[in-house]
Image: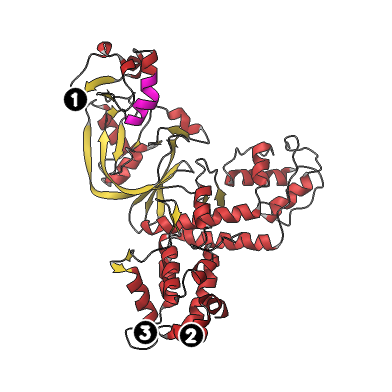
Amino acid sequence: MAGLRRFLGSACLTGLCLLSFGASGAPAWTPERLAELDRLIAASHEDGLEPGDYATVSRSPQAALELLYCHLRFGKVDLALGEARWNCSGLEVDGERLPDKVARAVDEGRIEALLTAARPTHWMYAHGRDWLARHRDWQAEGPWPVVGAGITLEPGAVDERVPILRERLRRSGDLARDILDAGNFYGPALVSAVRRFQARHRLEVDGRVGRATLAELNVSLPARIRQLRINLDRARNLLHEIRDEDVVVVDIAGFELRYLRDRERILTSRVQVGRTYRQTPEFISRITEIILNPSWTVPPTILAEDILPQLRRDPTHLQSLGLEVLDLQGRPVDQAAIDWSRYRGDQVPYVLRQPPGPGNALGRIKFVFPNPYLVFLHQTPATALFERDRRTFSSGCIRVEWPFELAARLLGDPGQDAASLLALAEASEGTQSIRLKRPVRLILAYWTVDEDPGGVLVFKPDVYGRDEGVWRALSAPPPGKTSGVP
């Protein structure tokens, strides 16, 4: 209890902090409860949080507990705002004001149970805590060896960097410690370990230690711990939304869609997401409708930034795109009569639309869910791009490799499998709408740390550079205190 009392100040030592009474009339903050809170604040380190945040935020233990509960339940970083949460008093949990919920738990002597229930119950969160602990154990053994720069290390080569590479992979568990030392020879066992390392860092799996693989090998332990902490906070923001029901999760950084039922994957599909300058947003919604043979109305951003500049240079460009021009009342307009040089992006008095068909930008199927970003899941004619490792090609929407398989699972109707839905779409060019009887939760998430289905830890490239902003907010000290977070 010394730690908490030191931060709460001399008032606690004189007994004044015990004058907070519970509903029963007994002191809410007895010495035993203060000691329990002190222990639980220290244990927040295991969740990737900073115990000092809660010991210094207020002289009130009630306020410290409220903030710790808030960060475990909702995340320290508000991902929508990109800033740390310091005032949680207005939040509600299960229909109850957070301060009331916390005060009742203290009064009933359920402080630890309160915090345990705040954490996500999803396995991904528990595994993330385990991986954080493991990396901290590795850190206690000393820094990872740094593999020196040089020519690409090819299988079968002899190189003085091989012993360092071997030790580096042993330290991270990619190479078993009982593998015999082969000196400077880059032999089969070590090549297999490099391939394993490449696979779980989303690199080209070729067993060659070139520039990209070397860069990932030399990412420091503190940096990996930081990455784990960032993604644990993302998990606290989102994983409560993955329940024992059907959920579609789009892993933006991993270029993958997962259909979950009872938290188990029943469908996995590669996806293409937004370019770095047209990033796919993160949000939660529900898929409500499936559209077969959709038309595509050009969004204002694409019209202003992509199409209009080309039309000023070549007015016939619309024909090559297969776009028709409508006025704001939806009536066709003669394209040849339009002087596109007169307009800027926010002043165009026309709507550009691509009719339904196999060459439509949305393919033969799209999935509708309420959102302010004009974002859809949809098919794409650009199927060859699914073979790329880094699939940032769209203008923000999510292109799905197996859209009809996704539609079949969303509908849950044995008579509407993927093949029958595709046949229905191909039988006519007309647009058809299918409302889901039960909307399905959709989560667009950005994970740079994950586990593959075999339980192997995966680090992914931060393709949008979002980790740094989350880290700044996560490591931000309480107002008025200078940061000392490592």
Q: Residue type at mark 1? A: Gly
Q: Marks 3 and 1, Cα distance to the nearest angstrom?
A: 67 Å
Q: Which residue is mark 2?
A: 32
Q: In this image, 274 relative to 226: left or right?
A: left
Label 3: which secondary element:
loop
Mark carried by residue 165: none
Sooner in the amino-acid sequence: mark 2 or mark 3: 3
Q: Nearer the viewer, mark 3 or mark 1?
A: 3
Q: Is residue 220 above or below residue 51?
A: above
Crowd band around label 3 with a 10 angstrom C-alpha radius: few (<14), some (14–19), many (20+):
some
Task: Note whether residue 424 is visible.
Answer: yes
In the rendering, at what x and y percent does residue 128 appear? 52, 59
Residue shown at 62%/43% (left/top)?
198
- Residue nearest the observer in this picture, 141 or 61: 61
In the picture, the disc for residue 330 is: 1
Callouts 1 and 2 close, C-beta under 8 Å? no
Q: Which of the two marks, 2 or 3, is nearer to us in this view?
A: 3
Magenta run includes residue 303: yes
In the rendered structure, which segment of residues is drawn in magenta? 299-309
- Per the image, the residue denoted by label 3 is 21
Q: Residue at x 72, y 46 (%)?
A: 190
Residue 302: x and y in percent read 36, 28
